[in-house]
Structures are given as structure tokens and as C-alpha cells.
Image (cartoon, rainbow, N blue to C red):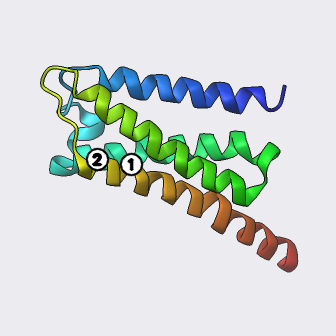
Amino acid sequence: KHRLLPRLALLAWMALILFVSSRSSLPGDSPPVAWLGQYQDEVGHLVEYGVLGMLAYLSLLPSLGRRRACMLTLALGVVFSLGDEAFQSLIPNRTPQVTDLLLDAVGVIGALVLLAGIVPRLKRHLRASG
């Protein structure tokens, strides 16, 4: 039961990414994203794949351990990004881009650095000082 929820959250997030990718145009002038200006697309990729990386890592960690969960999370993120970009090539007004793949990978790596690298060290530090 405790492993099902993270996996369902991961699948729901992946479905949301594909839903957004299926849109011919994205709302770029809405107040929540308009302040990003010309960087809306880049930040969008970093955030959506950062969340994907977090959810994938948290769903894989209990059964695989930290190192294998990191490797599989990165592989899953890159393969899903490739599929997402291929899917976008079928949507009118959308084009696949290599820079999007790179941003997606950076988003996943950022999540892994945070969850697998920084958080465990921070917890150890807090336990040692507390």
C-alpha cells in the first residue's frame, strides 16, 4: 500500500505531461507563468521533469536502493522525454527539440541531486547537531 501511492502519483504526472504535450498551443500569457517572460518553456521543462524525477525516485527507492533508483530514474526520465518529444511531433503547431530533451534531463538530474544527494546529508547533519 505504501508503494502504490508514489507509483500512482508518478503515472498521474506522466499522464499530465502527455496531456499538456497534446495541446496545439499552451497558455503563455496567464498570470502564473507570464512573469517568466521568454523563459516560460525552459522553466516549464525543468519543473515538469524535476517533479517527474522526484516521483520516480521516491517510487523506486524502497525496492531498489539509492544508487539503482537514481540510475533507473534518470533512464526513465530520458526515455519518457524522448517519447514525449516524438509524441509532440504528431501534434499541430508543436515541434520536437533537442534542447527540450536536455532541459528534461537537467530537471531529472536536479531532482536526483536534491533527493539522493542533499537531503540525506542534511538529515545526517541535523541528527549529528541535534
54 relative position to 30: left or right? right
Amino acid on which the number 2 mark rests in the picture = Asp
Say which quadrant the N terminus sits in. Answer: top right
Tell me, yes or no, whether the two marked residues, 2 and 1, touch with CB atoms within 8 Å: yes
* Residue drawn at x 33%, y 54% as measured from the top left: 102
125 relative position to 79: left or right? right
Q: Which residue is mark 1?
A: 104
* Residue drawn at x 64%, y 57% as measured from the top left: 115
Q: Label 2: how many residues lie within 10 Å, few (<14), some (14-19) or many (20+)? A: some
Q: Residue 41 in the image: x percent, y percent?
A: 24, 44
Quadrant in the picture for residue 12? top right
> Could you say whether the residue bearing mark 1 is in a helix, strand or loop?
helix
Say which quadrant the C terminus sits in. Answer: bottom right
Q: Is 29 above or below relative to 64?
A: above
Q: Is 50 above or below relative to 80?
A: below
> Could you say whether the residue bearing mark 2 is in a helix, strand or loop?
helix
59 relative position to 114: left or right? right
Residue 100 is marked as 2
Give the residue furthest to the bottom: 129
